[in-house]
């Protein structure tokens, strides 16, 4: 085997190593995508819980403010079942309801953003894995092509013309 054979073997070996590395990178990319997706799903759950807590806190604060308002109106001697105190209580209840809805809306939006990021992260990992797998296939094809070319050149350079099998084939080196 001459220098050309050694060079072809080294080139094929390099292609095989590249294929192996690409396969490993594909698996790692998929794992990273799954991990990041889980992180974003956890963030979505945390957002829902946080905003639910905020909503409950707003309800308690609203009840406190309503109680103070009613106490002040009662201390002034005003009737609480008619007129301005009743309108003020209705407006406060309406504002508290709007606040709760807004908090719930913001919480759900934050959670959905995180869930969407989870989907993107998982897809990104899968796409990266497919790209690395394609690189691995390309490297394997390159190695095969290099070896086939080297074998073909060897056959051409060492053919005796008499129909005998070359030493390369005879000793199982193909």
Image (tube, grey):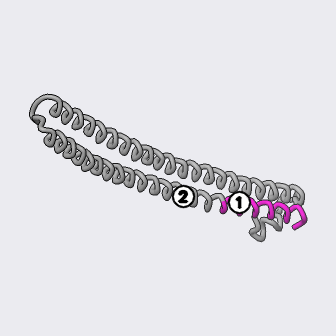
Q: Nearer the viewer, residue 21 or 169?
A: 21
Question: Does 95 lie within the magenta span?
Answer: no
- Report if the CB atoms under discs 2 and 1 are less than 8 Å apart: no
Q: Nearer the viewer, residue 163 or 112?
A: 112
Can you say whether 7 is above or below 115 in the image?
A: below
Can you say whether 94 is above or below 26 in the image?
A: above
- Seen as rendered, the residue at the extreme front is 76
Relative image position of residue 18 (x, y in whole percent): 71, 59
Tag 2 secondary structure = helix
| Mark 1 surroundings: few (<14), some (14-19) or many (≥20) residues within 10 A | some
Relative image position of residue 129 (x, y in whole percent): 57, 53
- The residue where tag 2 is placed is 32
**Which mark is on residue 119?**
none
Q: Nearer the viewer, residue 126 or 23?
A: 126
Of the numbered discs 2 and 1, the one sitting upstream in the chain is: 1
Q: Which residues are magenta?
A: 1-21
Distance from disc 2 to disc 1, alpha carbons, whole Å, reads 21 Å
Tag 1 secondary structure = helix
Question: Does 15 lie within the magenta span?
Answer: yes
- The residue where tag 1 is placed is 18
Which residue is located at x 54 percent, y 48 percent? 124
- Seen as rendered, the residue at the extreme top is 83
Q: Quadrant of the C terminus?
A: bottom right
Q: Does 150 sit left or right of 59 as displayed?
A: right
Q: Quadrant of residue 22?
A: bottom right
The nearer-to-camera label among 2 and 1 is 2
Which residue is located at x 49 percent, y 56 percent? 34
| Mark 2 surroundings: few (<14), some (14-19) or many (≥20) residues within 10 A | some
């Amino acid at each position: 085997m001459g220098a050309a054979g050694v060079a072809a073997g080294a080139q094929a070996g390099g292609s095989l190593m590249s294929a192996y590395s690409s396969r490993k990178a594909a698996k790692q990319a998929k794992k990273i995508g799954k991990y990041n997706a889980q992180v974003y799903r956890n963030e979505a759950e945390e957002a829902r819980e946080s905003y639910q807590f905020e909503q409950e806190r707003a309800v308690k604060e609203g009840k406190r403010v309503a109680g103070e308002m009613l106490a002040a109106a009662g201390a002034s001697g005003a009737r609480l079942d008619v007129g301005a105190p009743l309108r003020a209580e209705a407006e406060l209840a309406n504002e508290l309801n709007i606040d709760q809805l807004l908090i719930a809306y913001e919480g759900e939006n934050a959670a959905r953003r995180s869930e969407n990021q989870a989907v993107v992260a998982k897809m990104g990992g899968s796409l990266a894995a497919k790209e690395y797998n394609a690189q691995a296939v390309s490297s394997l094809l390159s190695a095969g092509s290099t070896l086939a070319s080297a074998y073909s050149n060897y056959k051409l350079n060492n053919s005796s013309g008499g129909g005998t099998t070359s030493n390369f084939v005879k000793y199982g080196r193909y």
